[in-house]
Image: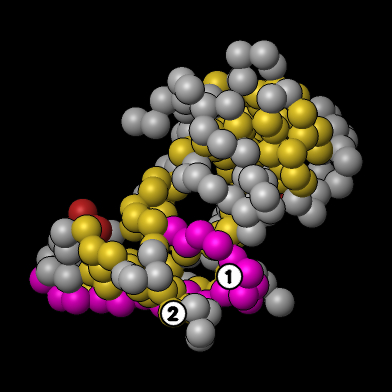
Amino acid sequence: ETGVTQSPTHLIKTRGQQVTLRCSSQSGHNTVSWYQQALGQGPQFIFQYYREEENGRGNFPPRFSGLQFPNYSSELNVNALELDDSALYLCASSPMPASSGGTVTDTQYFGPGTRLTVL
Amino acid sequence: RKEVEQDPGPFNVPEGATVAFNCTYSNSASQSFFWYRQDCRKEPKLLMSVYSSGNEDGRFTAQLNRASQYISLLIRDSKLSDSATYLCVTTGNQFYFGTGTSLTVIP
């Protein structure tokens, strides 16, 4: 087990609603990244948080937003849900930020994910 | 163009077989490389990092060819428990995952 936890495990929402997903990072890790994994695809980077600030963002619209708290736990918020938002949402923690001189320096450890279904 | 390209498979091999997966990446400035394993409906788990000199971990061997920008994973003496999807990962300012290669080891 990686020590990264996520809640809830499953969630069903309807189009237009808002959702908040939660992640607790592994002890000693101060960086949290969020990924979206659609069926049959690899995980796609949404954004990363380091010391409570966004530290890089992938190609996702602004309705995907996040927070990191002083204890390094994190939230992913998605507004105005669309059918295509149905996916497995993965949180990963690492002990260093992704961008350290512009390169990733450390491995990421994933939580079990939240499976979101939008109807 | 995708950052990372993988043959999605599926690869169906008998127990005891040797199987190899390849992955190509587009960013020549990529610094770190990994193979992750993902079981059905589970999270990805780190299998091994990939180093320029090549590295081995038991039945698994990973190699990196920077000139040709590809990464490989070799699994020897396949076990039923090796059945999973194998994800190739490269890095820049974020982790880039391939779509994964599906492996089924048949008794």
Q: Is residue B71 visible?
A: yes
Q: Do the residues at pointers 2 and 1 share their chain?
A: yes
Question: As drawn, is A42 to the left or to the right of B44?
Answer: right
- Rendering coords of residue B57 (x, y %): 22, 58
Quadrant position of residue A13:
top right
| Mark 1, residue position | B4
Question: Magenta includes B21?
Answer: yes
Mark 1 falls on what kind of element?
strand
Q: Which residues are magenta?
A: B16-35
Between A13 and B73, the one nearer to me in the picture:
B73
| Mark 2, residue position | B65
Output the chain of dot 1.
B
Q: Earlier in the sequence, mark 2 or mark 1?
A: 1
Output the chain of dot 2.
B
Q: Amino acid at mark 2?
A: Asn
- Rendering coords of residue B44 (x, y %): 44, 47
